[in-house]
Image: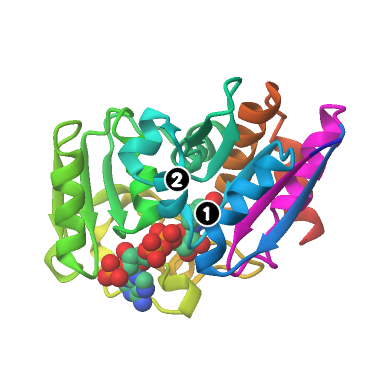
Amino acid sequence: MLFYAVVGNPVKHSKSPQIHKMFAKQTDQELQYTAVEIEDVDFDEFVKDFFAEGGGGLNVTVPFKEKAFALAVDCSERACLAKAVNTLFMDGDKKLCGDNTDGIGLVRDLTVNNKVELQGKRLLLLGAGGAARGALAALVSEQALSVTIANRTLSRAEQLRDEFGDLVELQVKSFDQLGSEQFDIIINATSSSLSGETLPIDPAVIADGCCCYDMMYGAQATPFLSWAKENGARLALDGLGMLVEQAAESFALWRGVRPDTTPVIEHLINSGE
Ligand code: NDP
């Protein structure tokens, strides 16, 4: 039986083992999937040993996505754009391959699961870390009317503009420079909700019919989503669907079959697991 894992630190809270178990059952495949917590210094060795022992594939999460990118011999275009890898596997020539399925996971959750059109919309992406990079790598091909990035540390957002500028025109702002310019879709790719903080942005940025999306998820509404609802957003969505969608893309890369994500998302929501 082939074995798979998600590697990160911390990772014990991860829903990935549960999600992949449901995918395997649904597609009638036998596999094992575990969560492995390791120390920073052990990452490269862990990956080499995992595949040397016959591992089928790895998901990589915080804080190892950049290390995985550096280690992979062959990376997909979207992983190269994001400079981060969340999915590792060996190809037929035993070459370590890296991909990044976070961005497509986000786009599918917005457009397929929640029927949110991106084309022609004014998009605001909050954050300039790994998740924002992964998201941008997928969002650049969605033909938004405009894409603005706002980050606490302006220089990190400017860095993204320098890297992605050939693919899409990006406006870059600090939170207070946002003023009252309005947006149709606002995506929170910061980790502010992790620390229970509300971002210092003017609620006037929420346009009529606006969709607010927090990549974070949890049993309770995140501070960002509470702020969105209080200030009139039409939709306030958390990142659970993105998590399941990015996992389905990884599963498809490894197993050649894409599971149906709808029953898995419904199960996670209804069971509260
Ligand atoms: P990084 O550490 O790479 O980046 C963190 C970002 O958040 C930076 O832009 C940072 O700004 C900003 N930030 C952190 N704290 C605050 C704060 N208190 N106020 C304002 N900005 C803040 O993290 P990731 O990009 O990897 O992850 C970001 C979030 O996305 C996490 O909550 C993670 O759980 C979620 N995520 C969800 C996924 C899913 O499938 N649903 C997939 C991937 C990520 P600065 O540059 O100024 O430090």
Query: Can residue 219 be seen at all in this image of the molecule?
Result: yes
What kind of element bears circle 2?
Answer: helix
Say if disc 1 is inside 8 Å of ligand 1: no
Seen at 66% across and 41% down, the residue is: 51
Q: Residue at x 87, y 27 (%)?
A: 28
Q: Which mark is residue 71?
A: 2
Residue 272, labelled with which disc? Answer: none
In the rendered view, tell whether residue 46 sits above or below residue 86: below
- Residue range highlighted in magenta: 3-29
Quadrant showing the N terminus: top right
Residue 195 location (% of width, % of height): 47, 79
Q: Are marks 1 and 2 in contact (CB under 8 Å)?
A: yes
Tell me if 28 is positioned left or right of 172 in this view: right
Q: Residues within 10 Å of mark 2 (few under 14, many from 20)?
A: some
Q: Nearer the viewer, residue 61 or 199?
A: 61
Q: Which percent across, then down, holds residue 19?
A: 74, 46
In magenta segment, residue 17: yes
Given residues 138 and 74, the one toward you in this image is: 74
Element under label 1? helix
Check disc 1 and report the residue beneath it: 44
Residue 107 left/right relative to 261:
left
Q: In what quadrant of the picture does the C terminus appear?
A: bottom right
Q: Position of residue 269 (x, y in %)?
A: 73, 54
Picture quadrant of ligand 1 = bottom left
Q: Residue at x 76, y 53 (%)?
A: 34
Res 234 seen here: no
